[in-house]
Structure formats: structure tokens, C-alpha cells
């Protein structure tokens, strides 16, 4: 993807963004409160139809009587509605649904999808989120009717294939994590965290101990302390040492008999693998605490090192990160947990059991899978035998399990290891490229000299020397066709940018991204207002994100 700019005069500017997008002629408007011109989006030559009807909702398109779908004849005798649903439970008036034709429906949602940034059209180095390419093969497998049309109320006897997939996935994840038992139910990383913290609490309570504290390094993802609070425990922050790892002295000072667990990700959110992990494990185990591994960064270590071998008792996976489930926009995700033998009895039910049964022809045995919710039906010490209860309805997001299972089978153990090695290589290549282009003078690496699968640079010097902030840089990247990295996280780094290039990106893409960063810094040296007012090429510009979160307008006004 190329990016060139050609200033054609004081009043106008041509901006070419990407190979395939139209040239937008921008009007240059006077800056508020100053006489300097600055570019604002006002395309006059090629008006994009996507922009033209941006305000139209599907309800505004509705015309009474239009339909996108007509149900075929059911092929069974009609029954009066009164006979099936009593009048008291029926709507008085039909639901106000939009009435549109199929082409209108398709165009509406395709148009909306194009107003967003997506992984299928551009580089998405959103640190800590592992936005890797999702191979289409897994979509195909997930869409097979036996998977996609399976009803959640199907009995175990009628869902043996699905249970076998889930059981197989449990075994695969056990192998990746180095822990013997897996529970697939949690629907997000943070849901897995909640499950894990509740398990650690149950484990201590069963031994008659009421431990209240959870150690969380100050590099931790925000969901870690939030989870601790939701589980009714107390967050105790642990400092970071100058190398970006856990400050061992601070850990020692805070590790006492009230500590229920430590929540740690390794590599951490600075992209640094903590070489002191064995010492950390021994300090926490020494006071009777449990080690929880936040597996969101597993993409750096699959097939190379295993949390179970590092001394962790509980691990969550983000299947929607390391294992190619498409994500963003709220789901569906999946955050299974793997646990050690001592934690296993407490895992949520139902658990999947594989049982040997006599073969139908009476010759020898075969196996069948069952879902067991009643702890009394489980042998002492088995997963679920002292369960904390149910975590959610049904079994979890089954479609995610199928995609993840096919991803692991298609790569195999050595392929997973390759994926992690290339993820780490790509991150270090990008880091070196930024050095070569001189970008790291104004955007230095926050900790260390190398990284694992991601790295954090600080926009502090850029802000002081060029007058643009990390947010401005991020917004300007959108004009270059790149999704910005994660910004202002981790919190301990001034003006942080957390960059995770992932293994599925080609070298040319990494080069182009590095060049875009260099170009934005160069441009800011000449005129910082360009970045300060970016983006110019997106359907909407800077948004009031706090306002959108606090006062969302989610209702369609009734006409
Ligand atoms: C390090 C880390 N831990 C936990 C989570 C939480 O995962 P989820 O978003 O699936 O709840 C994330 C998500 O970004 C993360 O990056």
C-alpha cells in the first residue's frame, strides 16, 4: 500500500491513500483560532457513495410491504395462533421491523461494514489483541450444517460428534498450556479470568483459608484488576523493574499469607518475557498462593514454553486472539481455562466425560461422550466434583471451538511453534526497521532492547519535540490505511503505543507501516496541525468517545 502526498497549493491538497482508493481532493479550511490553513475532509472531485448516504439507517429505508424474504409453505397443516400461544402472551401490534428488499438489505450492511476498519483490508497492529489473519478454511468447517445448525438443547446422545470436537480441543489446549484439565465454557478472556479467580478462591476456602488479596503487576491488563474486584477480592499492585519485569523486592514485600493468587501474563503487556518467572512462582507458592496466567499473550510462546511448566495453576486462553477466531466489535469470543490437578475439582459444570462402553455388536468396547452436571456423579478429585457451579448457559461459543480445533489440527504442533516464532520475528523486524528509519529517536522503546511478539514505544519525546501526541499519530495512521496500534496502554509508559504486528503479515506490510510512521514524524516537523486534525479520509473524524460510552444513543426515534 503506497502513500503519497502532493501539495498543490495553499488552498488545496491531493491525498492519495492506498493503491485502490479514490483520490480525495481536500479543501483546506482556516484553522479555528488561527490563520494557518489546515486540511479538512471535503471531497469535491470523487464523492464516494458510501459517504453520500451515511446518515441513512435501515429504518429510514423501510417502505411498508417490502420484503427481503418470503417463507416457503411449511408443508404442515396450519394451526390457529390462539391454539399455540395464548392471547395474553402475544403482541398487540406487530414489531416495528424495517421493511426492505434483499438488495437494499445487503447494500445497507455492506455499506456499514465498509465504514469500519477491518483485518481483511488492512494491517491491524493492535497490541495485546493479536489481530491475526483468520484462514477461510476454518469458516468453511464452522459452517458445515452439522456444526452450524446444531441446537443447544440437543441431547448428548445426538451430539456425539460435537462433544468429540470439544473433548479433542480440551486435550489440545491442555497440551499447549502444560496443564491437565480444560474447561471450555468462558466466553471471553475476562470471563476466563473471573472463572479462574473464583476457582482459586474456592480452592483456598475448601482448605479453610480466607485469603483476600490478589497480586497484579502494574503492567497488567485492565481486566485483571476489574476481575479481582468482581470476585470480591482486593487488588494489590506490584511494581515493574527497570527491565520491564516484576520487581522482585516489591513482590517479596507484598507476598503474605493473605495472598490468594498472583495474576500474571508472560510475556507481559510490554512484550517482555520475565526471566525471573521461576523465582516469582516460588515466592507466591512459598506463601501458599496460586499462580494465574493471563494467556492473552500466548501467541508469543505456543509450542515453545508452557505456563504449566513455569509453575502456573490456572491459565486462560483467548481463542479469539491466538487461535484465529475473528474478533472485534464485541464477539463472539472464547476464553477457556486450563487448570492443575489441585484446582480441577472446582471447575464449572457440566464437564465433558469420555467413557468406555460396550460396543453395540457386543464385541469389545467403544467410547461415548457425556455432559455431567451433577457433582455426585463424578469421582472424588475429578474435574467438577466440587464445582463452583455453572458459569453460563449451555457450553460456550461452539462455533469458536470448531474454528480453533481446525486451526490447531491444520497447523499441528510444529505449525503452532512456527506461528509464535514468526510473530516474535516480525515484531523484532519492525523494531529494527523503526531504528533504521530513525523513528525511535522520537518514539523510543519503553523497556529493554528486543521484544517478544509485541513492543511498547513511548511518544513522550515526539510530544515534546514535534508537538503531536500519540493520539494524533494514531489518527494520522488511519489516513495511511493502517489501523493504529493500542494507545495509552500500558499505563506506566508515557504516551504509550503498543504494537503487535503478528505472524500473518508480510515484510512489505511491516516496511510500509514503518515508513508511514517515519512520514508522519517528518510531516509533523513541518506542520504539526496536520496530525493534530487527522484523520481526513475516514467516514467520521474524531469522536467524543467518552460521550458515546456514557450517553449512547441506541434507540431509533419513532417516526
Ligand atoms: C493481556 C490481556 N488480558 C486479558 C484480556 C481480556 O480478554 P477479553 O477481551 O477476551 O475479555 C485482554 C484483551 O485485550 C488482554 O490483552
Image (cartoon, helix red, strand yellow):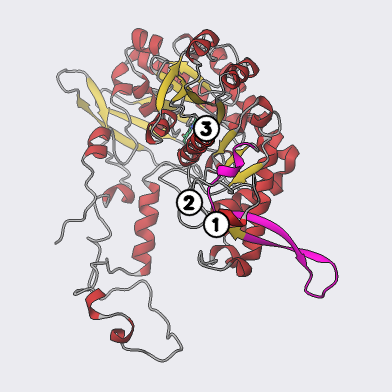
Q: Is residue 140 in view?
A: no
Query: Is 101 on the left-hand or right-hand side of 236?
Result: left
Query: Is 185 on the left-hand or right-hand side of 69?
Result: right
Q: CA distance from mark 1 to mark 2?
A: 9 Å
Total number of numbered discs in the rendering: 3
Tell me residue 384's x, y (percent). 58, 48
Q: Residue at x 42, y 20 (%)?
A: 236
**For the C terminus, which image quadrant?**
bottom left
**Residue 326 inside the magenta-drawn segment:** no
- Residue 362 found in image quarter: bottom right
User: Earlier along the polypeptide chain: callout 1 or callout 2?
Assistant: 1
Residue at numbered disc 2: 390
Q: CA distance from mark 1 to mark 3?
A: 23 Å
Q: Residue at x 25, y 76 (%)?
A: 65
User: Earlier along the polypeptide chain: callout 1 or callout 3?
Assistant: 3
User: Relative to the observer, which residue lies in front, 92 or 31?
Assistant: 92
User: Relative to the observer, which residue lies in front, 260 or 555?
Assistant: 260
Residue at numbered disc 1: 373
Q: Is residue 522 in view?
A: yes
- Residue 177 found in image quarter: top right
Q: Residue at x 57, y 22 (%)?
A: 430
Residue at numbered disc 3: 204
Q: CA distance from mark 3 to mark 2?
A: 19 Å
Helix, strand or loop under label 2: loop
Mark 1 or 3: in front is 3
How packed mark 3 is, by other alpha carbons closer than 10 Å (few <14, some 14-19, many 20 or more), is some
- The part of the chain drawn in magenta is 342-370
Query: Is 283 on the left-hand or right-hand side of 362?
Result: left
> From what the image shows, is residue 237 above or below residue 178?
above
Amino acid at each position: 500500500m503506497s502513500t503519497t502526498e502532493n501539495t498543490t497549493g495553499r488552498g488545496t491538497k491531493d491525498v492519495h491513500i492506498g493503491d485502490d482508493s479514490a483520490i480525495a481532493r481536500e479543501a483546506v479550511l482556516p484553522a479555528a483560532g488561527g490563520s494557518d490553513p489546515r486540511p479538512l475532509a471535503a471531497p469535491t472531485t470523487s464523492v464516494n457513495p458510501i459517504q453520500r448516504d451515511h446518515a441513512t439507517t435501515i429504518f429510514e429505508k423501510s417502505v411498508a410491504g417490502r420484503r427481503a424474504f418470503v417463507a416457503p409453505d411449511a408443508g404442515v397443516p396450519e394451526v390457529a395462533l390462539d391454539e399455540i400461544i395464548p392471547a395474553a402472551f402475544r403482541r398487540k401490534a406487530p414489531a416495528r421491523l424495517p421493511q426492505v428488499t434483499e438488495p437494499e438489505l445487503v447494500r445497507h450492511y455492506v455499506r456499514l461494514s465498509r465504514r469500519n476498519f477491518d483485518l481483511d483490508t488492512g494491517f491491524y497492529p493492535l497490541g495485546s489483541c493479536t489481530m491475526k489473519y483468520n484462514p477461510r478454511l476454518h469458516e468453511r468447517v464452522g459452517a458445515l450444517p452439522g456444526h452450524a445448525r446444531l441446537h443447544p438443547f440437543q441431547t448428548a446422545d445426538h451430539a456425539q460428534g460435537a462433544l468429540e470436537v470439544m473433548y479433542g480441543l480440551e486435550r489440545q489446549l491442555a497440551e499447549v498450556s502444560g496443564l491437565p484439565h480444560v474447561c471450555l465454557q468462558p466466553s471471553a478472556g475476562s470471563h476466563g479470568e473471573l472463572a479462574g479467580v473464583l476457582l482459586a478462591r474456592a480452592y483456598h476456602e475448601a482448605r479453610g483459608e480466607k485469603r483476600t488479596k490478589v497480586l497484579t503487576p502494574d503492567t497488567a491488563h485492565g481486566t485483571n484488576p476489574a476481575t479481582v474486584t468482581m470476585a470480591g477480592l482486593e487488588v494489590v499492585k506490584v511494581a515493574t523493574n527497570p527491565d520491564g519485569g516484576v520487581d522482585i523486592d516489591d513482590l517479596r514485600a507484598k507476598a503474605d499469607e493473605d495472598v490468594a493468587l498472583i495474576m500474571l501474563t508472560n510475556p507481559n503487556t510490554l512484550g517482555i518475557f520475565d526471566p525471573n518467572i521461576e523465582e516469582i512462582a516460588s515466592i507466591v507458592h512459598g506463601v501458599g498462593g496460586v499462580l494465574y496466567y493471563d494467556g492473552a499473550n500466548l501467541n508469543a510462546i505456543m509450542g515453545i514454553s508452557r505456563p504449566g511448566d513455569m509453575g502456573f495453576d490456572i491459565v486462560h486462553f483467548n481463542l479469539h486472539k491466538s487461535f484465529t477466531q475473528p474478533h472485534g466489535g464485541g464477539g463472539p469470543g472464547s476464553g477457556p481455562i486450563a487448570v492443575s490437578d489441585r484446582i480441577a475439582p472446582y471447575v464449572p459444570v457440566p464437564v465433558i466425560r469420555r467413557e468406555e462402553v460396550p460396543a453395540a455388536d457386543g464385541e469389545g468396547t467403544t467410547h461415548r461422550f457425556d455432559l455431567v452436571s451433577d457433582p455426585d456423579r463424578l469421582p472424588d478429585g475429578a474435574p467438577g466434583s466440587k464445582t463452583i457451579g455453572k458459569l453460563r448457559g449451555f457450553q460456550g461459543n461452539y462455533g469458536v471451538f470448531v474454528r480453533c480445533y481446525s486451526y490447531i489440527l491444520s497447523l499441528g504442533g510444529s505449525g503452532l511453534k512456527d506461528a509464535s516464532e514468526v510473530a516474535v520475528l516480525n515484531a523484532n523486524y519492525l523494531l529494527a526497521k523503526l531504528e533504521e528509519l530513525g523513528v525511535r529517536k522520537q518514539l523510543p522503546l519503553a523497556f529493554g532492547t528486543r521484544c517478544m511478539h509485541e513492543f511498547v514505544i513511548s511518544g513522550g519525546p515526539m510530544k515534546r519535540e514535534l508537538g503531536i501526541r500519540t493520539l494524533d499519530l494514531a489518527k494520522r495512521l488511519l489516513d495511511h490505511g493502517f489501523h493504529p496500534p493500542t494507545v495509552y496502554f500500558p499505563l506506566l509508559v508515557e504516551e504509550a503505543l503498543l504494537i503487535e504486528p503478528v505472524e500473518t503479515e508480510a515484510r512489505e506490510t511491516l516496511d510500509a507501516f514503518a515508513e508511514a510512521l517515519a512520514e508522519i514524524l517528518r510531516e509533523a516537523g513541518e506542520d504539526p496541525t496536520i496530525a493534530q486534525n487527522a484523520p481526513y479520509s475516514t467516514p467520521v473524524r474524531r469522536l467524543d468517545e467518552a460521550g458515546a460510552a456514557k450517553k449512547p444513543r441506541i434507540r431509533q426515534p419513532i417516526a
